[in-house]
Image (tube, rainbow, N blue to C red):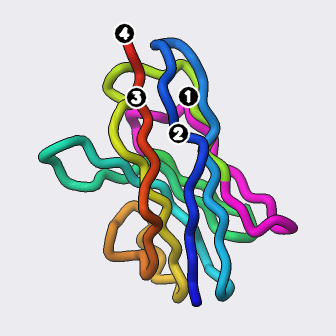
Amino acid sequence: QVQLVESGGGLVQAGGSLRLSCAASGRTFVAVGWFRRAPGKERMFVAAITWSGGSTYYADSVKGRFTISTDNAQNTVYLQMNSLKPEDTPVYYCAADAWGRGIPRSRNNYDYWGQGTQVTVSS
């Protein structure tokens, strides 16, 4: 059974940092991505990484502030978020690509999704 379990969300002041984790189990994946969704809006791409760690992708809004990485031994993907802003606030979702479609910024690239973890950045 495939599982993606996110953790690490919470409340932080603007300018602060958080690290999100996505623990994957049940099968191997080609890539893992992070998306976020604000209330009433669509799920938006944040960052993605190939499981080998060879390629990373970032949304322009987070480039230079967020870093995505893998720990293959732990089957975990991390999203280090620095210099957080109030607009970084929504629910963050981890997603896994089992087939390597090659469109990491698209929701359609992913086969499995986690339940989400809330990030709140206060001004």
Q: Amino acid at mark 2?
A: Gly
Q: Amino acid at mark 3?
A: Thr
Q: Earlier in the sequence, mark 1 or mark 2?
A: 2
- Could you tell whether 57 is left or right of 92 in the image? right
Residue at mark 1 to residue at mark 2: CA–CA distance: 16 Å
According to the picture, the residue beneath numbered tag 4 turns out to be 123
Mark 2 surroundings: few (<14), some (14-19) or many (≥20) residues within 10 A: some
The residue stretch that appears in magenta = 59-77
Q: Is residue 55 above or below residue 101?
A: above
Mark 3 surroundings: few (<14), some (14-19) or many (≥20) residues within 10 A: many
Residue at mark 4 to residue at mark 3: CA–CA distance: 10 Å
Q: Any mark on residue 120, and which?
A: 3
**Marks 2, 4: nearer the viewer:** 2
71 drawn magenta:
yes
Q: Which quadrant is home to the C terminus?
A: top left
Q: Amino acid at mark 1?
A: Arg
Q: Amino acid at mark 4?
A: Ser
Q: Earlier in the sequence, mark 3 or mark 1?
A: 1
Q: Earlier in the sequence, mark 3 or mark 2?
A: 2
Q: Which quadrant is home to the N terminus?
A: bottom right
Q: Position of residue 98 (x, y in %)?
A: 54, 85
According to the picture, the residue beneath numbered tag 2 turns out to be 9
Q: Are marks 3 and 2 in contact (CB under 8 Å)?
A: no
Q: Are marks 1 and 2 in contact (CB under 8 Å)?
A: no
- Foreground residue, 31 or 10? 10
According to the picture, the residue beneath numbered tag 1 turns out to be 65
Q: Residue at x 69, y 70 (%)?
A: 51
The local secondary structure at tag 2 comes to loop
